[in-house]
Image: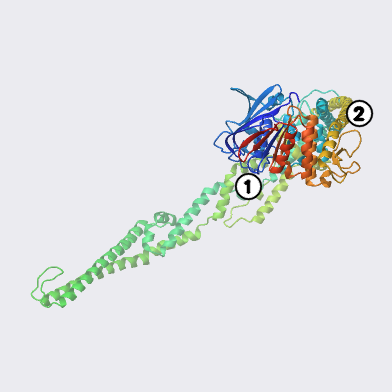
Amino acid sequence: MIGMYRLERIFFYNFKLFSGDFSIRFGSNDLIVFDGPNGYGKTSVYDAVELAITGNIRRFTSTESQQNPDDVVVAHNNDMNCYVRLELKNSEGSITVERCLKDKISNSDKKIINFRNLWDIYLIDGDDRRQISQLDLNDLLKNPNVCRDFTLFHYVEQEDTAHFLKGRSEKDRANALSVLFGDTVEMQEKVSKVLEFEKRLGDVVRDKDRERKILENRGNLNVSEEYQGAEAPFIPLLKREGSSFEWDKQTILNFSVEKRDSFLLELKKISALVENREFFLKYRVHSRATLQREVLMNFLAYSKHMDRLEEFKEGARQMRLVSSIASLLGGKLDSLLESPFLLECFDLVGYKNGEEFVAGLRDIVDGKKYNDDSSKVVSDLLSFRTHLQAHLDNNDGEKECLLCGSSFESHTHMMEAIKNKELALRSVLSVDEKRLDGLLSEFLSNTLPLFSRLVELFLERKAVPSADYISALESAKSVEDRIERLKLWLDKQDVTYSDLLLPYREESISFDELEENLLLLNKRIMSKVEAFPDGYEELESEMDFESVFGIYFDSKVELLNAVESTDIEEKQKYIQKLFFQSISNDIKAYETLISDLSKLNAKKDAIASLRTKLKKSISRYQKLLIKDVELPFYIYSGKVLQAHQSGIGNGIFIKDKTGGDELKNIRFVSNWKSDHDVINTMSSGQIAAVVITLYLALNKVYAKGLAVLLIDDPVQTMDEINMISLVELLRNEFSDRQIILSTHEDHVSKYFLYKFLKYRKSVRQIKLMERKEFQLSND
């Protein structure tokens, strides 16, 4: 065919099992046969052709997880570059394209799913090497759908000859074939534009309808004009800084009946509070006064005695001091002498002879300490002398004293002298002990009892509050300013309370008495408020004045006093005015929306009708066009199948079981009266033959740019009798195509070569196991 390309030569470098440079020359022959055992690269050659033309290898299946592979799937050595260069030739000249790995490849691009991202494409013209895009290659091959057409009817793969039938539903088959009809592409694009416009219009209609529902839900559309408020200027009602209440703003958005009623209810609550302001504030002050339980209890229990806190604390300190001295009187005298509180205790209990007491006590303590020290020294000395004396007793001739160094007339005289010295030392100890005993006897008999009696009398007569009382009084003292303010307020309100103040008692406060007095004081406080005005309690319960006072006036009396009933009435009028204006705006907006929706829905229906008519027209036209494929497919399938259950020579029908004049579903049947697809009625070998003939029929009718048929080892799936018929079909019906066939069966290879050579076709045999090529001739 004029202008359609055949394969001239292919070059590999580091591609799959081809480790280095390798090339195959097709030479634009009518038949090229790759033969020899499996495993020597026949399918790799087909992969290389597909990669060069489409930039992809369809049979690759992604099985990776989240991890990125480290190598490129088709590179023999990942440390080297990898490329495939394909030369194509037609009657007008030749082109050479090259797919090579990019200089920089990310690990994610090494995933099978990103296989296309690995490659750059170049156009080679002599020494000129120019990078191009897939679209540029499509233009060179004069087919904008080269990638689609290559896998659809140029290349029959080895692994899944029936993938067109098995991998697609009947509807998908129809869609796959319908895209082949080039003269409907422009119309399909128009349908797509109409559909896109219809969707945009639908979005506009939905937005408008959403606005309509919002206006209807406000409830303003059925409100009569009698709700119109009188003219009133905008004046903020609340004087508090930073007020952000919507009803007190100059503009209110999305006004509705519910919102208006809610605002007026809040204003009604404020109005009721303002009208009862005087009683509310007075009652609130007195009521809040009774709630200050802690302050009131401290006031009743301790206000009469707070000025005596320091006196009570000092008395308690003195009591603790004297008690500490009392605890030492029956103990060790040296501890009593060392006490830092002894001198102050003399003054507190009224003991006049404190200096003599301390002097006598010190003589006793110091004398005892001296005697203890002297006794220890003398006792140690006597013990030492006893040991030496025992030594001297055993030495009768010794006359020189080892203790003092003196010499005696005889040993006997020396021993007598030692004995006399011992008696003298012992007499010294007896004199000191007798003196100390006398001092101690005098102190314990006369001095100490007098002081002890004064201490006892002090402890018996001194009355001080308990530690708990002082602690409670200190706590009351910490809120003295609040107690003082309460007292001034009670005096101002003429509330009698002096008879309720508890007197000072040494024992603990009676909490029952305190609770009773607190109850009486609260009654006296509340008695200063006049009786509730008529209906006040019911109104306060309904309106919750305390909550209104806190929310809108920040619980500040001056803010409440700044609002008058006339101000509230003006605010109500202003809200009514805004509400009526909003009603008018809503009604106008609603009327506009209804009008717009009516027009838009009419346009939408018209566009939907146009889209439906266009699609039906295209489907009807496509069904007419598919008849271009039906006849050659029926003939080719009948020739290749030869014999099957429907009879010898009968082909396969393309059937749309839905009927009608539109193309919707495609089913392949061997009998027009049957609805069973050939997938379920034929053997795998027959199905392979059906698929190959469908490829051939599609190629015959729709091939553009490439005059090439690539069939990878059909014998693995086709019956032998079908293979013989296929040879005749290819030779007779596709004489203008370049057929590239692979087989591992030697007799099949020879049969193909023989048939084509017999009718003087150009034939080339390639043995990949030996890496040899043979140009065959019948001459």
Image location (x, y in percent) of residue 697: 80, 34
Amino acid tagged 1: Phe
Q: Is residue 604 left or right of residue 333?
A: right
Q: Secondary structure at mark 1?
A: helix
Instruction: Assess disc 2: are there few (<14), some (14-19) or many (≥20) residues with their C-alpha within 10 Å of its C-alpha.
Output: few
First in sequence: mark 2 vs mark 1: 2
Q: Which residue is mark 1?
A: 299
In the rendered image, the residue lying farthest to the front is: 779
Say which element carries label 2.
loop
Depth check: give the residue in front, 235 or 726. Answer: 726
Q: Which mark is residue 541?
A: none
2 or 1: mark nearer the eye: 2
Identity of the amino acid at label 2?
Ser
Q: Distance from label 2 to label 1 (Cα)?
A: 64 Å
Q: Is residue 423 visible?
A: no
Q: Position of residue 14 (x, y in %)?
A: 58, 36
Q: Along the line of sight, which residue is nearer the eye, 110 or 72?
A: 72
According to the picture, the residue beneath numbered tag 2 turns out to be 224
Residue at horizontal 58%, vertical 48%?
Answer: 475
In which quadrant will I find the C terminus? top right
145 is higher (above) or lower (below) than 412: above
- Of residue 184 and residue 12, the one placed in the foreground of this image is 12
